[in-house]
Amino acid sequence: MEQQFQEILYNPEVGKIVTILIGAAIILVLIKTLQKNIFTRIRDNDNRYKAKKISNFVGYAFILVLISIVFSDKLGGFTVALGVAGAGIAFALQEVIASFAGWMAIMFGGFYKTGDRVQLGGIKGDVMDIGVLRTTVMETGQWVDGDLYNGRIVLVANSFVLKEPVFNYSGDFPFLWDEIKIPIQFGSNYSLAKEMFEKIGKDVAGDLTELSHDKWKSLQNKYMLEDAMTEPMVSLIANDNWVEFTLRYVVNYKKRRATKTILFTKILEQVEGSNNQVKFASATFHLVEAPEFKVNISK
């Protein structure tokens, strides 16, 4: 029994396995120490998150390098076989490889970061986590109106960023242009209505005008963009049924629904308090006198 134990203890393969286990433990301890003592001092949440993810990846890479070094004398004879097997594995795991490439693009290409509101593969929501293969999203919309959470957590493959458009609602420009349409009866005081709606827009959304314009200027310095109007504006058209006013304004990407509620509330109050100078229009149907029917019943 003692002799068998000594044979196992002095077996070169066992020594290599022990070396790998000890080396892997040292690498993992070093990575965790760096994350705890150095990365926690990074103030920016996004940079701290990226540093943690990259350090984990580097740690796993070092472990693979350690394994290849320890067993280097055993791997030489399998070079050709590994090449053939690698081609088959690459074909079978092409989606996994594409997702990993997508993760690299996300981390270093600035597609989006945790906390951003995005739309990926038809899924819209806020990014909770960016994994090596999948992005975790807290979904908004679907059966819930507006931009509110519906409680469903969705895992989206990172390969989508290489295949489909990525819609980022909160990247370099965390604002959206939104608008509401207000139907007004013919014969109303159109000048008063326009003045009324412009004032409401400035009272509710005017505080974002300067801030959003500064952000837009930053975008112009980075990309080829024309100047954009960020102040609330009112336009109108006339159709067969009514005069349609459109109030256009800039809003924070997370406050579209709340802002629209405030705007509609103020518009209703102002129109109802205009002494009938401004009246809402609606699609109504007026039934006139029914045609006369004559029925002749004969035996």
Image (cartoon, rainbow, N blue to C red):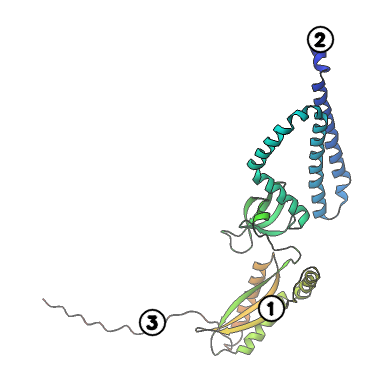
Q: Which is more toward the observer, 16 or 257?
A: 16
Provide the secondary structure element on which disc 1 rests.
Answer: helix
Residue on which the image places disc 3: 287
Q: Earlier in the sequence, mark 3 or mark 1?
A: 1
Residue on which the image places disc 1: 201
Q: Nearer the viewer, mark 2 or mark 3?
A: 2
Mark 1 and mark 2 in contact? Answer it, CB < 8 Å. Answer: no
Q: Earlier in the sequence, mark 1 or mark 2?
A: 2
Name the outermost residue toward the front.
Answer: 80
Percent position of residue 231, x then y: 73, 78
Q: Is residue 117 visible?
A: yes
Q: Amino acid at mark 1?
A: Gly
Q: Which is more toward the observer, 171 or 166?
A: 166
Mark 3 and mark 1 in contact? Answer it, CB < 8 Å. Answer: no
Task: Left or right? Give the position of 284 relative to 163.
Answer: left
Q: Which mark is residue 3?
A: 2
Crowdedness of circle 1 by 10 Å Cα count: few (<14), some, many (20+)? many
Image quarter hosting the N terminus: top right
